[in-house]
Image: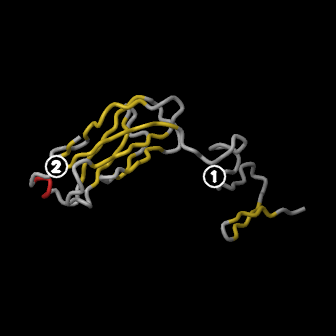
Amino acid sequence: MTFTPDNEDTVVGDFSIGEDHDTIWVRVTQTSGPGPWPFSYGILGWQSDQGFELGSIKCYGEPTGEVFRLGIGRPPLLRDGRLIFDPRSFNLAWVRAGTPWTLRFEAASGQSSTGSSPGDPVFGTRATLGVLADLANAGVSYAITKGTARILLSP
């Protein structure tokens, strides 16, 4: 795809994420040569009818290509959407002078590795998120020292 100063929120293409997938990896390769635009970038995102469910990322064009990750750690509500690229540049003068920016996009979806085993607690259960609270009003006392919470027990 070739971008000029007139391009905004360009649809790169439709993309459906696989069932139970939570991440899209997009390889972006600059095919217009190294060029004088080392500070040019674009905002890349995947948009469904629910919005940018996997977030967005600042992405630069590299002649050798670079892989960018779209994901927030959970699957989107909808599986069908489109890749959107909004080109930005540090200085649009070079584009207006007749040097458009050409990029190739390749995408794949999958599941992010969380590094946890199946027996580990999941989001919202037990005290896995650094939350320590006395939900039962039992008078639990605790102290935090050097980033570690210690429950203070009394007979």
Q: Earlier in the sequence, mark 1 or mark 2?
A: 2
Residue 83 image position (x, y, % from top left): 34, 37
Q: Nearer the viewer, residue 141 or 32?
A: 32
Colour treatment of the image: secondary structure
For label 1, the residue is 129
Amino acid tagged 1:
Leu
Residue 47 drawn above or below residue 72: above
Quadrant hosting residue 105: top left
**Residue at left 69%, top 54%?**
133
The amino acid sitting under disc 2 is: Pro
Query: In the rendered view, does 46 fall on the left or right side of 101?
Result: right
Q: In this view, does 147 lie above or below 138?
A: below
Residue at numbered disc 2: 100
Q: Which residue lies furthest to the left in this view?
A: 97
Please identify, in this view, whether the residue under mark 1 or under mark 2 is nearer the observer. Answer: 2
Along the viewing direction, whichever of 47 and 130 lies nearer the viewer:
47
Label 1 close to label 2 by CB (< 8 Å):
no
Residue under the point 71% across and 63% down: 149
Q: Residue furthest right?
A: 155
> Tag 2, which secondary structure?
loop
Picture residue at 41% right of the left edge, 48% below the top: 68
Front one among 41 and 9: 41
Taking the image as shown, residue 12 lies to the left or right of residue 136, namely left
**Element assignment for label 1:** loop
Q: Where is residue 126 in the image (x, y as percent from the top left)?
A: 71, 47
User: Residue 125's spot in the image, x, y percent?
Assistant: 68, 43
Quadrant of residue 49 within the rendered picture: top left
